[in-house]
Amino acid sequence: MAVHRSGRLVAALLVALLAIAVVAIPASAVPFDEADFSGYATGQVLHADALHATGVNVANVEEAWTGAAVDSQGLTSAVKNEAGLDRTVIAAQPTKKTAGRGSGLELGLGVDDDTANDLQIQIAEAAAPPNASAMDELLGLPASPLAYASVLRGAAEANWNNSSTCVLGKDLSNGLGYAADVELIETGTTDPEGDGNLDAPLISVNSEVTNPDERVAQSFSHTFLDVQQKADGTPAGLRFGLSSEVRMNIAPVTLMDGALTLNFLGEWVLRATAGGIPGTSHIHYGPGDVSPQTPILQIIQDGEITDIISFQDILGEGGLPIVIDGVLELVIGEDPRAIGGDDTTEPSVAANGTSASAALDVVRVKVLDGEALDLRFGHMEVAAQVPVGGIDCGIPVSKTSNLNGVTVGQAFTTSIKVDNPFGCDMTVVKVIDKITTEGDAKFQVLSTSPTANQVPAGSNLDSGTVVWDNIGPIAKGGSKTVSVTLRAQGGGGIIEDIATAAAVLGNCEGEGDGSTIVGNSPPLEVPVVLKTKFLPETGVGTSGALYVGALSLLSLAGVSIRSLRRSKP
């Protein structure tokens, strides 16, 4: 019974929320099909500008590199990493609105002292419209003396079938990069066991002092529409903004054939959110689910943990430097900074809520004064931009009537259809039908289907509201219809009504659970006329009636019906 009471309480609270939502929506948000918004996210678990070892030079090494971008006006320009990396994340594609990319490992250029040689490994890419996805997996990469990996995987997804329906409950775009047991740059004997493994790799995530389950590097970048909220998660509006986010797990990294191991713990997250109203632009950074004294990095030398650095050690600091003379220079935990800026810069966050952007490196490393290695672990960049007021993602609501026009005393039925085109189920779906009149028209509500929770009483009403507290749920891709049967009363005029639907999103394919959305139907007008008599020109008395000519019902296109045509006397 306690479970049932709890469920009823939750439902009651949601209904109350929806009651507020129906009347509290600001009118300044821009409809999705008109909104100008854009953003991108990119993450690289490992990036190396250059490596120099045993006569082999490798440039632009990327492990678990991902990217995601969206531009409602089209991807007319390439999305590139900040200055200093200068890599193309997403290529220009003017006919596409969203795109994602993911790769497990890329060696943009592998050369010895005399010979240049490109080594390009698997890359998954997708762009929309129409909706698209891709995945590429490689089991085993023996590429000695440059690289070895047991598993490499790249995946990408892009969602944007049309410009009239918001992409809610799933990503606009995403990319996944996954790499297991990666070893880079042989510094000893080449492949002594003949199995592809490197004997003495300069960089390895195949550390013997860590759990084998942790020897996986993964990066996930995505962009998605996000309900307007403050940095602490407090709802700030019922429209939507844009979030660009990178989530990353960094595998333990061993440098210089076991001289030093860096064991990164937890999932790292960098997110930029822009909601379009003041207080809704913000940057979030940190390991997921941080608790007091959460360890985020262990430094292991000769199989022994020599230092543990917690999130609290670096909170509020610009970075924590560690120097091992002549061997290692390490900077950990810098604050988010401006994209393209140094560690003294601040992220860009607009006070009016229209934009936010940031970049950072979880760790920057130089080995042997940068001669052996100059690399970054956990490089992330995120940016989001939306119009003032945010993005309007209303529930599609339409109305039809079984009659184009009626006479006084005649009954007619209006049907209200609520569609769910989103990547979430709609739960606790509330429908409100506000009925008004013009001229001398009046009305009476005869019945509702299903039975409404609120029905106006009376037989000569000039306004009233019908309310269904909860007709839901409506599953992804589904719809439901409710109806009201009215009788025209009074005199000639127009009976008009506008339906509003509000719902809570749940069981989403991606982000969006718990978001509240609201949508209105265009106004539906049913003309009401009076029966009367006319005398034709011949003077012979006949019975006639006013009539509505060439009327069409209001459609989804939102055409109002106001003109009445009278038979010629």
Image (cartoon, rainbow, N blue to C red):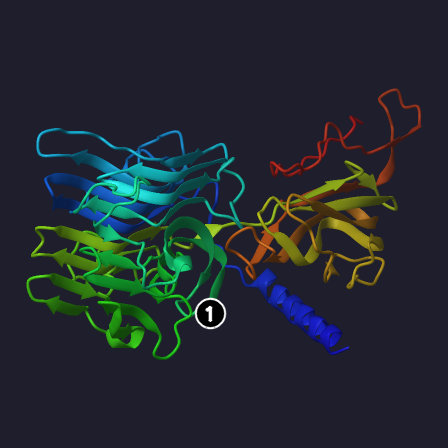
The quarter of the rendered structure image containing the C terminus is: top right
Label 1 neighbourhood size at 10 Å, few (<14), some (14-19), many (20+)?
A: few
Query: How far across and down, in percent of the image, does residue 431 sit?
Result: 69, 56
Residue 28 shows in the view: no
Which secondary structure, mark 1?
loop
Query: Is residue 342 left or right of 313 when viewed as pictured?
Result: left
Residue 255 at x, y percent in the picture: 20, 57
How far across and down, in percent of the image, does residue 473 sit? 70, 55
Residue occupied by mark 1: 234
Q: Position of residue 342 (x, y in %)?
A: 15, 58
Is residue 68 left or right of 509 when viewed as pictured? left
The amino acid pointed to by label 1 is Thr
Q: Quadrant of the N terminus?
A: bottom right
Q: Residue at the spot x=84%, y=61% of the render?
A: 458
Please tell me which residue lies in front, 408 or 85: 85
Q: Residue furthest front?
A: 193
* 120 lies above or below 34: above
Which residue is located at x 83 percent, y 55 percent? 444
Instruction: Count all numbered tags in the image, as a single digit.
Output: 1
93 left or right, relative to 473: left
**Residue 95 location, quadrant:** top left
Q: State the residue in front, 431 or 46.
A: 46
Q: Is residue 101 above or below residue 274?
A: above
Residue at image location 69% in from the left, 71% down from the top:
12
Asked if one can make out residue 383 in the rendered structure from this viewpoint, the answer is yes
